Amino acid sequence: MKKETVKIVLLGYMGSGKSTVGKALAERLHLRFIDQDRYVEEAEGQSIPEIFSSKGEIYFRKKERFYLTEILDRDDDFILATGGGTPCYGNNMDNLLEATPNIFYLKLSIKALAERLFKEKEDRPLIKHRSEEELPEFIGKHLFERNQFYARANNTVNCDGKQIHVIVEEILSRLV
């Protein structure tokens, strides 16, 4: 009898803590952690900002989809932190939902996201050229567009004001 694999997926807007929470969760469960953005960068031999700059967003989104399929087809147990836009392109969200019932949307307020992202905006192609004043409006508009995809996750974890270990415990309590 084949053992059922454990696949846990974290999704949410950039800066929502997917990688940080994913690493903590993986450590707690002794599972492999996969950061989809790092996976793409290693496979492509370029950083995401370099890919955006040299080959464009459409190329990146195609590769992102290709590597997501590669990851989901794995036979081992893992925790995956998707890229912020991953669920919003092609049929990626459908593929995620087919792969596992353990999909968690890490939800943060626009204010909290803007505070986090402003500190690291140089590394983020979509917001690199936004001022501190423009950032909340951009995030709000972007979240409005993406929310229909994020809302399809099996679980939503409100992360505002919560420490990592509290978020991890909340996820653990909801695993199928």
Image (tube, rainbow, N blue to C red):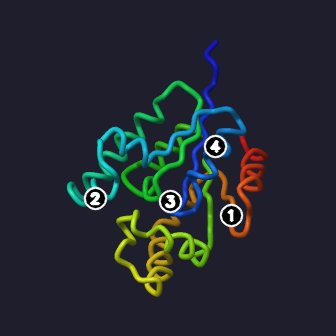
State the separation of the CA atoms marked 1 and 2: 29 Å
Of labels 1 and 3, the one closer to you:
1
Q: Please tell me which residue is depicted at 59% across the width and 58% down the height of the picture.
A: 17
Q: Which residue is mark 3?
A: 149
Q: Earlier in the sequence, mark 4 or mark 2?
A: 2
At numbered mark 1, what does the secondary structure look like: helix, strand or loop?
A: loop
Q: Which residue is mark 4?
A: 102
Of labels 4 and 2, the one closer to you:
2
Numbered badge on residue 52:
2
Q: Please tell me which residue is depicted at 49% across the width and 49% down the height of the picture.
A: 82
Q: Earlier in the sequence, mark 4 or mark 3?
A: 4
At numbered mark 4, what does the secondary structure look like: helix, strand or loop?
A: strand
State the separation of the CA atoms marked 4 and 2: 30 Å
State the separation of the CA atoms marked 1 and 4: 17 Å
Displayed quadrant of residue 166 = bottom right
Q: Earlier in the sequence, mark 1 or mark 4?
A: 4
Q: Which residue is mark 1?
A: 159
| Nearer the observer, 76 or 47 | 47
Of labels 3 and 2, the one closer to you:
2
Image position, residue 33 (x, y; %): 56, 39
Please name the amino acid that badge 1 sits on.
Answer: Cys
At numbered mark 3, what does the secondary structure look like: helix, strand or loop?
A: helix
Horizontal side of residue 14 vs 89, given as left or right: right
Q: Please tell me which residue is depicted at 49% across the width and 45% down the height of the picture.
A: 35
Displayed quadrant of residue 58 = bottom left
| Nearer the observer, 113 or 176 | 113
Please name the amino acid that badge 2 sits on.
Answer: Phe
Image position, residue 57 (x, y; %): 28, 59
